[in-house]
Amino acid sequence: MELFLMQLLNGINIGAIYALIALGYTMVYGIAKLINFAHGEIIMVGSYTMFICIATFDLPVVLSIIITILACALLGVVIEKLAYKPLRNASRISLLITAIGMSYLLQSVFQLIFSANSKTFPQVINVSNVEIFNVTVSGNQIVTLFVAIFLMIVLDLFVRKTKTGKSMRAVSEDSGAAQLMGINVNRTISITFSIGSALAAVAGILYSSSYPLINPFMGSTIGIKAFTAAVIGGIGIIPGAVLGGFILGIIESLSKAYISSQLYDAIVFSTLILTLVFKPSGLLAKHKKEKV
Amino acid sequence: MKKFKLKKIDNKKKTFLYIFMIVVIYAIVMALTSAGIINRYYNGILITVCINLILVVSLNLTTGYLGQLTLGHAGFMAIGAYAAAYFSKTFMTIPQPFSFIIALLIGGVMAMIAGLIIGVPALRLKGDYLAIITLGFGEVIKTILLSMAIIGGAKGYIGIPRVTTFTSAYVFVIITIVFVCLLIKSRHGRAIISISEDEIASEASGINIVKYKIMAFAFAAFFAGIAGGIYAHYMGIIEPKTFGFNKSIEILVMVVLGGMGSINGAVIATIAITILPEMLRSLSQYRTLMYAVTLIGVMLYKYDPRVQVLMCKAKMFCAKINPFKRKEAK
C-alpha cells in the first residue's frame, strides 16, 4: 500500500510536469494547428538558462526563475516570428518540418555551447520533506504540485475571463472570423506562444529539480511524452491537456513499478494508441461532424 | 489522334532512357569499384544511399501519394531488420543468395503484417492524429525490441551475416522504384492519388477508401521491412535505438524536400541528403546545425512570396533562352 501511494505520488509529480508542457502544446495546436516539435527544446533551454543564472552568475533563485521564464517566453515568440509566421499559409507538413528543424537547431546550438555531456542542475527548491500516512512526500513533489495547480488555475482564469483570453479562444475557433471581428490575430498567436513557452520554462525548472541531470537532448523525450498527454486528453482542449498529463504520469509511474521497468514506454504509447482507437480525437474532444 | 501518338513515343523514349540510366549507373559503379576508386568507405555510403532510397520511395507512397502523414516508418524498418536477421541467424545452413532473399522477404512480410495491424485501426484517424498514432507505434516497437533479450535487447543483435553488396541493394532499389511507379500509374494508383486530393469526393465517386489506404500502408511497410533487412545484413549488428523517432523524421524530411509525390525528387533529395553529410565530415561539429538551418531555410524559401516571384521570373527567363525549346502543340 505504501509502495502504491509512493508510486502514485511520483506519478502525480511527473504528471503535473507533463500537464504543464502539454498545455503549451495544446494551446499552440489549437491556435496555429501546428505540432510544435520545438516545444520540448524550450524545456531544455529553460533548464540551461536556470543553470547559467545560478551556477555561473550566482543570482538569487527568484530572480533566476523570472529571468528563465522571460527568456523562454521571448524565445517562443522569436521562433514563431522567424520560422512559423512566414509559413502560415503553407502546407501543414512544411510547418511540421520547420518545427522539427527548429528543434534540431536548438539542440545543436546548445550542444555546441555546452557540449553533449550532462550537467548537474543546482538544487533550487529547498522545502523539507513531509510525512503523510507513513509516506514521505518530498519537498520537490509538494512544490511541483502546488506550482502546477496554481498555474493551471491562473491559465484557466486568464483564458476564460480576460479579453486576451477571449481573443485566443476566438482565434482557435475560427481565425478568419476572429480577424473580421477586429481581433489582432498575429498578436494573439504571439501571446499564445509566449504563454506556452513560459509554462514550458516552469516545467523545465520543476523537471530538472526532480531529475537533476540536464543535457541538450533532454527536451525531445519529455516533449514527445507531454505531446502524447495532450493528444490523449484531446489536442486543442485545455482541460484535456491537464487530464492527459496526470493520466500519463500515473500510468508511467505505476507501470514502471509494477509491470516492467523496461517496457513502461511501450505501455505509455500503447495507452495513446488505445485511446485514439476508441476516442479518435482524445478523451475530452467533442465530436465534430465533417462537412462537405 | 496525332497528339496521342506523339505522347506515346515520348513515354517509350522515357522508359528507354530510364533503363539506360539504370544500366549506366550500375556499370559506372562497378567499373570504379574494380578500378579501386570506390573503396570500402564509398561502397558503404552507396549502400546507405540504396537503403534510404527504398525507405524514401516507400514512404512517398503513403505520405506523398496517399497524403497521410506518418511518423513511424522506422518502426517498420526495425521489424524488417530484426525479422530478417533472426531468420538469417537461425537458418545459417541455407546457401547464401537464397537465404538472403528469403530473409528479406520474411522481413518485408513481417513489416507488412505490422503495417496491417496498426493500419486498420489507425486509418480511421485523420491528419495529425494518424501522424501521432504512427509515432506512438514506432516508439512501442522500439521499446519492445529493447526489452527482448532473445534478440540482444539494448546491447544490439550481433553476428548477422554481412552479405549485403551494392549489387543486391541496387537491385532492390530498382524493384521498389519500378513497383511504386507501376502502382501509381495503374488504376489503383489513380485511386490512391484521388484520396489525397479529396477524400470525400473520391468516396462519393465509388472508391473504397479503406481498401486503398490499407493497401498503400501495407506496401509501404513491406518495402520498409526489406530496407531494414538490407540494413541488418549490411551492418552485421543492429540496435533498437537506431530505429527511433529521429530515423522516421530523417526519412520524412527526404520525402518532403524531394517534393511529395515525386519519385525523381525523392531520389535526388535522398542522394543529396545522404552524401552531403559524409562530404562535410571535416565540419562534423556543425553538421546538425547546418542540417537544421537547411531544413528551415528550404521551407521558408519555398513559401516566401518574394522568392516565389523570383523563381517564376527565373523560369520564364530560362524558357526564353532555352535553345531546345519544343514547339507548342496547337
Image (spheres, coloured by chain):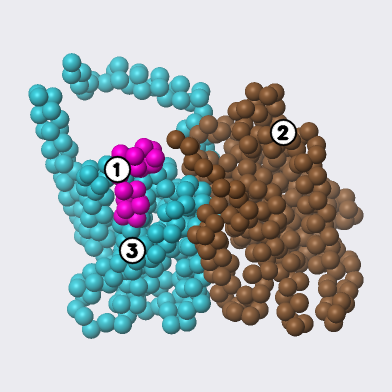
Chain colours: A brown, B cyan
Label 3: which secondary element: helix
**Measured Cα–Cα span from mark 3 to mark 2:** 47 Å
Output the chain of dot 2.
A
Choose top left, top right, bottom left or bottom right for residue A82: top right
Residue bounds of the magenta highlight: B195-216
Across the whole image, how many numbered discs are drawn on residues?
Answer: 3
Identify the residue shown where x is 70% and y is 27%: A183
**Measured Cα–Cα span from mark 1 to mark 3:** 26 Å
Asked if residue A49 lies in the magenta stretch, the reply is no
Q: Which mark is residue A140?
A: none
Output the chain of dot 1.
B
Which residue is the site of mark 1?
A: B206
Q: Residues within 10 Å of mark 1 (few under 14, many from 20)?
A: few
Which residue is the site of mark 2?
A: A167
Label 2: which secondary element: helix
Question: Looking at this view, is B237 or B302 the one in front?
Answer: B302
Kind of residue at disc 2: Ser
